[in-house]
Amino acid sequence: MATPKTNLATPGLTGVHHTAFPTWKPKATVEFYRDVMGLKICHAITATGWGRNTDHPHPDFLHFFFEAGDNSAIAFFYYIGTQRREEFTQLKGYLALSRHTAWSVDTEEDLVGWVRRFRDAGVRVTEVVSHETLDSVYFKDPNGYHLEIARQSRPLNPVDVSDANLTVQAMVDTFGDDNPDQHTLADMWRYKAGLVEDHLQLLPSEA
Amino acid sequence: MPKLYVLDVPEFQPVIDALKSQKIATEYKGGYACFRSDHPIELARPKMHDATWFGFPVAGIVGTLAEHTDTRFRLI
């Protein structure tokens, strides 16, 4: 099972401060996050390029932040004079969906409120999609970045956490890195059953 | 003898209820419902979201996953 790579205690974390992305559309980005979503700009820096004289010259840039609740932010870098790099913004299909930022809301009312707000502003947004323990809506910003707003539909309990750890262990043991033995998900589910059985044997019998 | 573990949480309850209605031997322990049968474990999709229908075997299977389509699940 888990083998710590260090004996040092895990320092604390208090949530996401910010995530950051490059943008080649600073105007549209500001109009979306500030004017459509209504997020407040909370920080912005500008800098002439760092390391100009190295083998890896750095363009002049701006770095600007929008508040996203609970002391978190979403931020963008605008590198002046650079060409848009579509590998950042034009992922297609499931890979595009896999890389996203998801914000949280506490209530169904807020979730539906975001749908209404986006539609009122002419932004395409999904209906509320229910997952295992999340209800989510999905949309994209002008850069093509995928965004989600999610509401936890029920609190996660100790069984959820325990099972998640077994699932992740099954994933690691089954697929390793790059899945060299070309296992399938069904292979992993079979392996997981063994982990669950071992786990249950360690529990006291239920009356 | 196929065996299916299902995490006993609300989102997977439609699967648990459907399998229990088939009188498949069921054991509850540690937050899991375990179904075992001498015959294939078959299930027509109850009313469930995609994420839960296609993910409910995550707790583990013993046997061969013969079918898991949009509408049916069969473990042999």
Image (tube, rainbow, N blue to C red):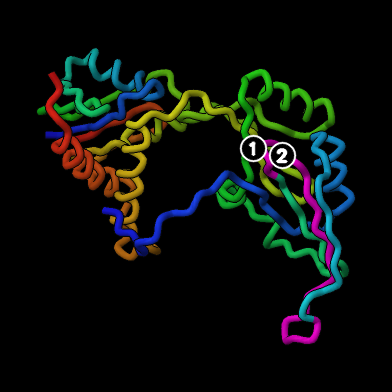
Q: Main secondary structure of the magenta part?
A: loop
Quadrant that contains the C terminus of chain A: top left
Report in which chain the residue with disc 1 lies: A
Q: Which residues are magenta?
A: A52-72
Q: Secondary structure at mark 2?
A: loop
Gap in Å between the C-alphas at discs 1 and 2?
7 Å
Three-letter residue code for mark 2: Ala
The mark found on residue A103 in the picture is 1
The image shows a total of numbered marks equal to: 2
Residue A11: image x %, image y %? 48, 53
In the visual, does A158 lie left or right of A10? left
What secondary structure is marked by label 1? strand
* Whole-percent x, y for residue A177 in the image: 38, 63
Q: Nearer the viewer, mark 1 or mark 2?
A: 2
Who comes first in sequence, dot 1 or dot 2?
2
Q: Which mark is residue A63?
A: none
Q: Is residue A26 above or below residue A196?
A: below
Mark 1 and 2 residues: CB-CB less than 8 Å, in contact?
yes
Residue shown at the point (69%, 59%) measured from the top left: A88
- The chain to which mark 2 is attached is A
Q: Quadrant of residue A110?
A: top right
In the displayed structure, does residue B15 sit left or right of residue A58?
left
**Residue A181's image quarter?**
bottom left
Instruction: Residue under label 2, please give it.
Output: A68
| Viewer can see residue A16 | yes
Q: Find residue A2 and report its horizontal and vertical position in percent.
A: 30, 54
Residue B63 visible to the viewer: no
* Mark 2 nearby-residue class (10 Å; few <14, some 14–19, many ≥20): many
Task: Reply yes or no: does residue A56 show up in magenta.
Answer: yes
Instruction: Residue at 60% x, 49% y: name it.
Output: A93
Amino acid beneath label 1? Trp
